[in-house]
Image (cartoon, rainbow, N blue to C red):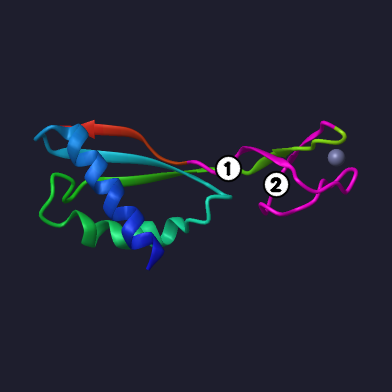
Amino acid sequence: MHEMSITQSMVEICEVHATGRKVVEVVLEIGELSGVVPESVEFCFEACTKGTLLEGAKLSIERVSGRGSCPDCHGEFPMLSLFAPCPDCGAFGLTVVSGEELRVKELELE
Ligand SMILES: [Zn+2]
């Protein structure tokens, strides 16, 4: 599963930053266009954190909505898919402004 390896590397990054301290809470930012399913990350989190500094930590996931800007009409729109055309003028090739995020936003240590 795709999310399993993502969660695994996320846990590894957190462990490096925790520098031996126990992690109480992890806040993750997942963009709607990142292709990552938050429910799957939640599901993998428990298995991936077993025996690590993150075991028993609370996982909070913040969704970042997709936004794109149009190269033709220079408008900015909510973007539901990476390959969607501009809802205003129909041009393809929108530039992603936000929504591809996949990062550890906060890490609360004991
Ligand atoms: Zn446009």
Is-magenta flag for residue 99? yes
Give the residue type at disc 2. Met
Q: Residue 83: percent from the left, percent from the top?
A: 71, 54
Give the residue type at disc 1. Gly
Q: Is residue 71 above or below residue 50?
A: above
| Quarter of the rendering containing residue 99 | top right
Q: Which residues are magenta?
A: 74-101
- Judge by depth and name the residue closer to the eye, 67 or 72: 72
Q: Main secondary structure of the magenta part?
A: loop
As drawn, the label of residue 89 is: none
- Judge by depth and name the residue closer to the eye, 69 or 59: 69
| Quarter of the rendering containing residue 103 | top left
Mark 1 crowd level (few <14, some 14–19, many ≥20, 10 Å Cα): many
| Quarter of the rendering containing residue 43 | bottom left
Q: Residue 25: percent from the left, percent from the top?
A: 26, 39
User: Is the residue at mark 1 in contact range of ligand 1, meaning its CB lies under 8 Å from it?
Assistant: no
Say which residue label 2 marks: 79
Residue sitting at x 74%, y 42%: 94
Marks 1 and 2: CB-CB under 8 Å?
Answer: yes
Residue situated furthest bottom in the rendering: 1
| Viewport quadrant of the C terminus | top left
Marks 1/2: CA–CA distance:
8 Å
As drawn, the label of residue 99 is: 1
Q: Is residue 23 left or right of residue 69?
A: left
Q: Residue 107: percent from the left, percent from the top?
A: 28, 34
SS state under label 2 = loop
